[in-house]
């Protein structure tokens, strides 16, 4: 692959650069589509459960996250152009651009009260579901005549109480015997 006097590459390099550009643009499109779908889904779920003020803050956070992604796309595109112009650009630089952008975008989303409220709601729902599952498991185990964690705990508490009473009785007996 040589560069002639007019500054164009021979056919192999042109095809390679065209393929790289097409691959990059397809990946960029897929990435932006995925980010848009995520933001849309997130905002849809927020609208059902949050106040207007929190929805607005969540929207603003999602827009800042979107801007971070767009900045990464622009930076990547510029670096790709620099690589095509002959500048030595390491492939890791593209990874670093997108990782940094992902961190920034998630920070923008996660620092909103909308995200905190949604996370709290999700945790609460998960805890309620866990409690329902635990209750159903306990009922099933009782129906099958198996001991549950609650049963074992209750037996342990009763055993401790019996030991405490026994110790108290032993102390009283020792005093009675000492008095005689």
Image (cartoon, rainbow, N blue to C red):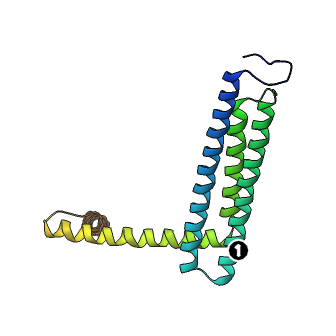
**Location of the N terminus (image quadrant):** top right
Residue at 80% from the left image edge and 19% from the top image edge: 3
Residue lying at the far bottom of the rendered structure:
52
Which residue lies at the image location 61% right of the left edge and 45% below the top edge?
Answer: 26
Residue 157 visible to the viewer: yes
Q: Kindly indicate the quadrant of the structure image that contains residue 150.
A: bottom left
Image coordinates for residue 129, horizontal then vertical, percent: 38, 70
Pinpoint residue 103: horizontal percent, then vertical percent.
68, 51
Q: Residue at point 61% right, 61% down?
A: 36
In this view, 97 is above or below 11: below
Q: In this image, 78 relative to 36: left or right?
A: right
Q: Residues within 10 Å of mark 1 (few under 14, many from 20)?
A: some
Q: Is residue 174 visible?
A: no
Q: Quadrant of residue 174?
A: bottom left
Residue 69, percent across and down? 70, 54
Residue projecting furthest to the top: 2
Q: Nearer the viewer, residue 93 or 136?
A: 93
Check disc 1 and report the residue beneath it: 57
Residue that appears at 64% across and 39% down: 22
Q: Secondary structure at mark 1?
A: helix
The quarter holding residue 109 reads: bottom right
Answer with left or right where residue 151 lies relative to residue 105.
left
Residue lying furthest front: 6
């Amino acid at each position: 692959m040589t560069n002639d006097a007019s500054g164009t590459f021979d056919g192999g390099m042109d095809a390679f650069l065209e393929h790289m550009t097409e691959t990059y643009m397809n990946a960029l499109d897929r990435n932006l589509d995925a980010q848009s779908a995520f933001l849309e889904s997130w905002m849809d779920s927020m609208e059902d459960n949050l106040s207007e003020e929190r929805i607005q803050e969540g929207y603003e956070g999602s827009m800042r996250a979107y801007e971070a992604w767009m900045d990464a796309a622009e930076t990547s595109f510029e670096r790709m152009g620099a690589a095509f112009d002959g500048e030595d650009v390491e492939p890791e630089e593209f990874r670093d651009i997108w990782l940094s952008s992902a961190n920034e975008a998630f920070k923008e989303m996660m620092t909103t009260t909308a995200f905190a409220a949604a996370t709290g709601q999700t945790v609460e729902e998960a805890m309620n579901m866990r409690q329902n599952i635990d209750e159903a498991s306990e009922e099933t185990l009782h129906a099958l005549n198996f001991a549950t964690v609650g049963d074992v705990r209750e037996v342990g508490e009763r055993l401790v109480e019996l030991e405490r009473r026994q110790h108290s009785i032993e102390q009283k007996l020792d005093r009675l015997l000492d008095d005689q």
